[in-house]
Structure formats: structure tokens, C-alpha cells
Image: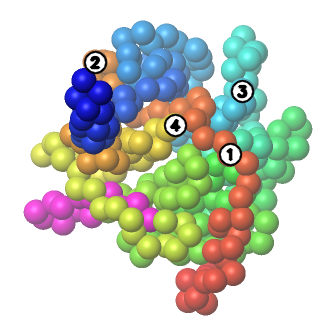
Amino acid sequence: MKYVFISFYLCFTVLLPFATTQAELTGEVIFGHPEHFDELWMTHVEDPRAAHKIFSDPVEAIGKFSVQKGGSLLVFISFRGIVADIHLFDRTQPRRKTRNLTKGLFDGISDVAISKNGDVAFTTALLDPPEARGIYLIPHRELQRNLPAATLLKHVSASNVEWSPNGREIAYATVSEVFLLNPFTGKSLRVSRTGTVPALSPNGQKIAVAHAFWPAPRENHLSILSLASLQPVAHIKVKDIPEDAVGWWGLSWSPDGQYLIYTIFTKNFQSFQNTAVPISGAPQERVFEKLPGGGVPEFDWTNTAYAVEPTDRITTLWGALKTDDLK
């Protein structure tokens, strides 16, 4: 009997890894309502039908937004006609008015992000004067001022901006390349010569990038690169791209780092599709499909499963770079 038990135990321990299922995609998110563009809602990604409104603003539309991880602040781009401004919202004071941080001083604001420390980075696409186009920083200490000071960090045409989990680097994308920016030195490191919508992993060790939306036949894929070596560690072919899809709109890691969720949009921004891609290679699945419109234009996680204390991972990388990767 003893040997039977030992044999059963050995078989069980050998087969257990093969019986393990993919971790469920879970987490609390804030999202832009797909029909009421002036509203932000909250739900759990595993049960979007339990969504409830947390904020509405008398604007024509709320664009890109960013949630402070481990904090209560949220920044969003508001549109009133052709004027775009960045507003600050404190989730602990939902009845209090939002604060306008830019007050019409910047044209063509395209993206915004807030770090865990409360620093705000945003991008502009100013055409006149062209030297004002770039990535700007509003330090957290400026947020309580009537007109916070915004400093130009990098003169560049950037479409996306995202803080690293430790709040010490900024990932951004140009027309065709992806970079990391050190806001304290102003130096940029090229991470990828192709791609867009960069997303830094919750543990700060990897960066994901979306590639090749336009070529026909479309071979759209996501790549994951190690920030320790800048070498790719995974290429994931995306599936279920609708025929009328136009381009990538967003890319995000799940809080546990087990999924990538990409957002694409169709012609004339008529609809959005959000798809979760397991890093393990398990089948891809639609998310937010049960909400009106079958998808959301914007969403962000309220927290992360990883600690976000600063590490020397990226700092070490900066010193080992080739000069042609620095700009």
C-alpha cells in the first residue's frame, strides 16, 4: 500500500503542471463610456456588467486618461470644441470639481500619464511654433498651483507616453520608433526601431510594443522586450482583427503581468475592440464585449499586483548603451 501511495504521489506531482490552467484575468479598471463620452465608469474586468459611473464632466468628450497607481489621482484630456486641456480629478473627493492644469495654453495634446509619485507627463503636437512640440512634465509639487508650471522635457513628435512603474522613466512612441526617456537627464534610449503604443510591465522588467498594422496581408503582432538587454523575449501574433480595423489605439499589461490587452479602432472611430492576450500562449479572448458597443475606447487599472519600488535595472542599462541608441 505504501508503494501504491508513493507511485500515485509521483504521478500527481509530474502531471500537476500540465493540469494547471491559465490565471484568470481580473482587476479593477476605470474606463471611458463607449456611448457617453463625458463619463468615466468603474468595474472589474472579469464582470463588466457590474460597472458604475464615477465621474461626469460637462465637456464634449473625455479622451486619453491615466490613473495614479496606489493613489487617488486621475488625469484626463478634455475636449471643448477644438480646445484640449488636461484635468486633474481626485477619486476620494468625487463631488469636488476637477482642476484644469493647462488652461488652453497647449494645442494638440494627444496623451497624458501620471506616475505613482503624482508627476504628470503629456505630449503635444503643436504646429505653430514647431519648437514647442514635444513631451512636457508637470511635477507633483505643481499640482496645487492655480497654473502649474509645465517643463518641456523633449522636443519630439510623440504620440504616446507612459510612466514606468517606479516613476523614474517615461516610455514614448514616435511615428515609427519607441523610446525610453529619463526625465531627470533628458536623454532618450531607443528601445525599438518599429512599433507603437508601448506598455511597461508592472514589475518594470519588460516593455511590450505593437507592430505592423498596415501591411497586407496583415501580420499584426506584439513583441515583448527585456529592459535588461533590449532583446525580444516573445513575439505574439494577434488574432481576430476585424476587416474594418484601422489601427492600434492602446496596449496595457494586466496587474499580475500575465496578460496584454490591446485596443484597436475601426473606421471613423465608430467602435473599439479590446482583446486579452495571455503571455502563456493560451487562447486570446475579447474583454468588455458585453458593454454597449462591444468595447471601450480607454481604460486603466486602478492598481498593480507588483511592488513598484525603484530598482537599478534601467539605470544599469543606460550605462551599457551604444551611442547610436541615445538621442
Query: Which residue is disc 2 drawn over?
Result: 290
207 horizontally vs 185: left or right: left
Residue 21 visible in rendering: no
Q: Point out the frontmost of discs 4 and 3.
A: 4
Query: Which residue is disc 3 drawn over?
Result: 72
Give the mark nearer the N terminus: 2 vs 1: 2
The local secondary structure at tag 4 comes to loop
Amino acid type, label 3 = Ser
Amino acid type, label 1 = Val
Local crowd size for mark 1, using a 10 Å CA cut-off: few (<14), some (14–19), many (≥20): some
Q: Point out the frontmost of discs 3 and 1.
A: 1
Amino acid type, label 2 = Lys
Q: Point out the frontmost of discs 2 and 4.
A: 4
Give the mark nearer the N terminus: 4 vs 1: 4
Q: Residue at x 65, y 36 (%)?
A: 69
Magenta residues: mostly which secondary structure?
A: loop
Query: Which residue is disc 1 drawn over?
Result: 308
